[in-house]
Amino acid sequence: MSRSFATPSAGEKAVRYVLLVLVLLLTVGPFLWQLSTSLKGPGEDVYSPTPDFLPSDPTPANYGQVAETVPVWTYAVNSLVVAGIAVAGNVVGATLAGYALARLRFRGARLVLGLFLATLVLPGEVTIVSQYVTIRSLGLTDTLLGVALPGALAMLNVLLMYTAFRAIPPDLDAAALVDGANVWQRLVHVGLPNVRGMLSVVVIFTFIGAWDDFLWPLIVLNDPARYTLTVGLQYLDGTFAANPRLIAAGTMIAFLPVVAVFAALQRFFFKGVEEGAVKG
């Protein structure tokens, strides 16, 4: 029997697996190395010419020492507050704006969409001064709300939700109209069930962006008690420049919540990608 063009040969499969392993090493390798370093004891030399990947005397004491040196859990709570405000703002705002642009007809819709697209060509560094002036005029400097507010509605997320709502067949809206559904009922019962995958994308990337942001919180915040985790962990680098174990432990503390959020939402994301915009 002849082999189909869609069926890869044994050599092609081997090349694919080699490339996958290479990509895995490049992406996961640094994370595993940081995890290994964070668990190494004080007697292990992390700068040896032939470093050991597995710690010979693993200990979680480095994590406790990080918590004793800086108020890492306070910083983590501050980051969670900022990320929560950003996620809530993007989920609600991007959903409403995306649905209005995609499914409702009103004068100036194309102009609004064009303005949204125009904001994407501006790098964040261009608008950071105007953002700071706005936050200062609102009296929100040195507050967590002032940190979260500029990222509470991202234009990219609006366009992602716009694309997702546009993929829904118009016949579904027409059928809902025949049944007497108003705009809110069509959004809740027709629109949202079909864009869960895209909503997961918005939540994941908004949380990662807010959690990992360093420059904007550094500009807005002055009180160390209000520092987010990424800003607060810089003290580890200054205080323990000769001890990379504590720096690695702090990095892992900042990284694990991102993994947890993605692990909790990835099934919705991949389910939405596999099933498409509309369920059959």
Image (cartoon, rainbow, N blue to C red):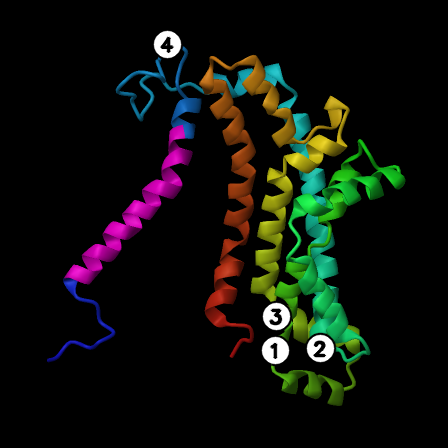
Q: Is residue 14 magenta?
A: yes
In the image, residue 128 sits, relative to residue 175, either above or below, namely: above
Residue 124 vertical placement versus 188 (above, below) = above
Amino acid type assigned to the residue bearing label 2 in the image:
Arg
For label 2, the residue is: 103
Q: Dot 2, crowdedness within 10 Å: few (<14), some or many (≥20)?
A: some
For numbered disc 3, what is the local secondary structure?
A: helix
Instruction: Give percent across and percent down for residue 97.
Output: 74, 66
Q: Gap in Å between the C-alphas at discs 2 and 3?
A: 11 Å
**Which residue is at a point 69% across and 83% down the rendered structure image?**
173
Residue highlighted by disc 1: 168
Mark 2 → mark 1, Cα distance in angstroms: 9 Å
Q: Position of residue 242 (x, y in %)?
A: 47, 12
The residue lying toward the viewer, choosing from 6 and 42, is 6
Residue position marked by numbered label 3 in the rendering = 163
Count neighbours of disc 3 (C-alpha within 10 A) and say few if under 14, some if 14 to 19, many if 20 or more: some
Could you say which quadrant of the image residue 170 lies in? Answer: bottom right
Q: Which residues are magenta?
A: 11-33
Which of the two marks, 2 or 4, is nearer to us in this view?
2
Q: CA distance from mark 2 to mark 4?
A: 63 Å
2 and 1 marks in contact (CB < 8 Å):
yes
Picture quadrant where residue 91 is located:
bottom right
Q: Is residue 91 left or right of residue 235?
A: right
Amino acid, disc 1: Ile
Q: In the picture provided, is 272 more to the left or to the right than 46?
A: right
